[in-house]
């Protein structure tokens, strides 16, 4: 695919004579590899630089880190490992790592190259440096809970987006990171509102400009060369991006809500989980499916003004399928990001300790989505109204945003 030129206004800064690109994706010269984000890794015995990348799995490559140090370029040989969760697609997520050389203990920017620069450290075909994040190992964080959303594409579900943002606020989230490919103009107005409120960070996610992405997770069903718009790379990047900004990160989607059963907020829930299980594990929350096709209409949960807005009203979906606990059931995690080395869609690939499955009677996921007719008729249906307990705060909050942003009354 032909790359779309990166906007000049996002490449205005320079480092070591090379433009700086703050956002993903940066093409590595001479190979089919792409930088996502670069981070200083403090948890190894010796500090290293870790770059989250997307690589063509069958391509043999020799990588180097080109570091910008006090205005000079320094080249260091790099190692790489491809994550095993590529779902048989041609491209996969990878970690490209390199040590900090003696002559460059405080690099500010990094680029990945597939050939060794000359002894003088010239930039060769490097067309952009990336800032090296996580420069300091912090113990106090600006956010307690951050939600990582990957990835937003062709998004038009405006009502559910506003409901998700306001529900996140109610349960105690302070930041939502959204890796966005594209959305409609109304959705963008909503996103702009939450960005202005400093509640949402939008990470431009242009991987589809470079790689033929799949719109699903099964290679046999969804055409493309990379799993689901590069979702796994985005999740890994989000963990590292917020490693020293947030006490916890939650890795799930906009149609999923992790709700405690006997508490209101995550701030009440997490101490209970840490006492019950451990402080040094990730927490897996089992998903219960609420089919789009079954709704229950009640005026107090379905304001007339909401019907003017495109999207799903989560409060109308109170019937869920039963889970067979002898089978695999989807789950998502909330975790201290400093415990995580690599993650995937469902669970952690490599972490300091294993994650644990939370008892669904303590908390679980309300996942409102399309369900196949086969699943619909094979599973018993249960009425579950727990999320309506939040309606007293959710309904007026959502209505207020719709009025302010979209002039919906």
Image: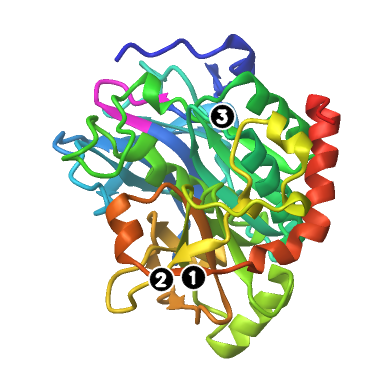
Quarter occupied by residue 204 = top right
Quarter occupied by residue 8 = top right
Magenta part of the chain: 26-34
Q: Which mark is residue 156?
A: 3
Q: Which of 29 and 10 is in front in this view?
A: 10
Q: Against 154, is 136 above or below?
A: below
Could you say whether the residue bearing mark 3 is in a helix, strand or loop?
loop
Does the magenta segment cover residue 53? no
Q: Which of 261 and 246 is in front in this view?
A: 261
The residue singled out by tag 2 in the image is: 322
- Camera-near label (3 vs 2) is 2
Q: Disc 1 vs disc 2: Cβ atoms closer than 8 Å?
A: yes
Name which of mark 1 and mark 2 comes first in the sequence: 2
Q: Can residue 43 be seen in this view?
A: no
Quarter occupied by residue 206 = top left
Q: Against 337, is 199 above or below?
A: above
User: Which residue sits at x=23%, y=31%?
Assistant: 225
Q: Residue 92 carries which label?
A: none
Q: Position of residue 230 (x, y in %)?
A: 37, 38
Could you say whether the residue bearing mark 1 is in a helix, strand or loop?
strand
Does the magenta segment cover residue 29? yes
Q: Position of residue 14 (x, y in %)?
A: 60, 19
Q: Which mark is residue 382?
A: 1
Using the numbered discs, state the Cα–Cα distance from disc 1 to disc 3 in whole angstroms. 29 Å
């Amino acid at each position: 695919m032909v790359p779309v030129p990166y906007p000049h206004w996002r490449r205005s800064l320079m480092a070591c004579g090379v433009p700086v690109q703050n956002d993903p994706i940066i093409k590595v010269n001479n190979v089919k590899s792409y930088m996502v984000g670069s981070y200083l890794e403090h948890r190894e015995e010796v500090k290293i630089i870790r770059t989250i990348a997307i690589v063509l799995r069958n391509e043999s490559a020799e990588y180097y880190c080109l570091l910008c140090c006090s205005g000079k370029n320094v080249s260091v040989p790099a190692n790489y490992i491809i994550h095993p969760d590529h779902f048989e697609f041609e491209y996969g997520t990878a970690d490209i790592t390199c040590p900090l050389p003696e002559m460059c203990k405080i690099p500010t920017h990094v680029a990945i190259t597939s050939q060794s620069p000359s002894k003088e450290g010239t930039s060769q075909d490097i067309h952009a440096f990336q800032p090296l994040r996580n420069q300091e190992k912090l113990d106090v964080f600006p956010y307690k809970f951050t939600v990582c959303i990957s990835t937003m594409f062709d998004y038009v579900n405006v009502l559910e987006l506003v409901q998700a943002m306001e529900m996140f606020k109610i349960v105690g989230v302070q930041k939502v990171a959204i890796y966005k490919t594209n959305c409609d103009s109304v959705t963008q107005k909503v996103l702009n509102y939450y960005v202005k409120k400093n509640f949402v960070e939008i990470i431009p996610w242009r991987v589809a400009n470079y790689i033929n992405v799949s719109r699903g997770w099964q290679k046999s069903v969804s055409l493309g060369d990379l799993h689901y718009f590069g979702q796994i790379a985005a999740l890994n990047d989000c963990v590292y991006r917020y490693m020293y900004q947030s006490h916890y990160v939650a890795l799930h989607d906009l149609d999923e809500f992790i709700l405690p059963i006997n508490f209101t907020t995550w701030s009440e829930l997490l101490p209970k989980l840490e006492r019950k299980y451990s402080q040094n594990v990730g927490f897996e929350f089992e998903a219960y499916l609420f089919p789009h096709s079954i709704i229950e209409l009640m005026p107090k949960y379905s304001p007339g003004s909401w019907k003017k807005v495109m999207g799903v009203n989560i409060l109308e979906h109170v019937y869920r399928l039963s889970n067979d606990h002898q089978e695999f059931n989807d789950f998502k995690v909330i975790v201290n990001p400093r415990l995580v080395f690599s993650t995937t869609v469902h669970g952690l690939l490599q972490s300091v300790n294993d994650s644990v499955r939370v008892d669904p009677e303590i908390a679980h996921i309300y996942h409102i989505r399309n369900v196949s007719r086969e699943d619909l008729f094979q599973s018993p249906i249960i009425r579950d109204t727990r999320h309506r307990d939040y309606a007293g705060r959710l309904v007026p909050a959502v209505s207020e945003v719709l009025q302010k942003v979209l002039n919906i009354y």
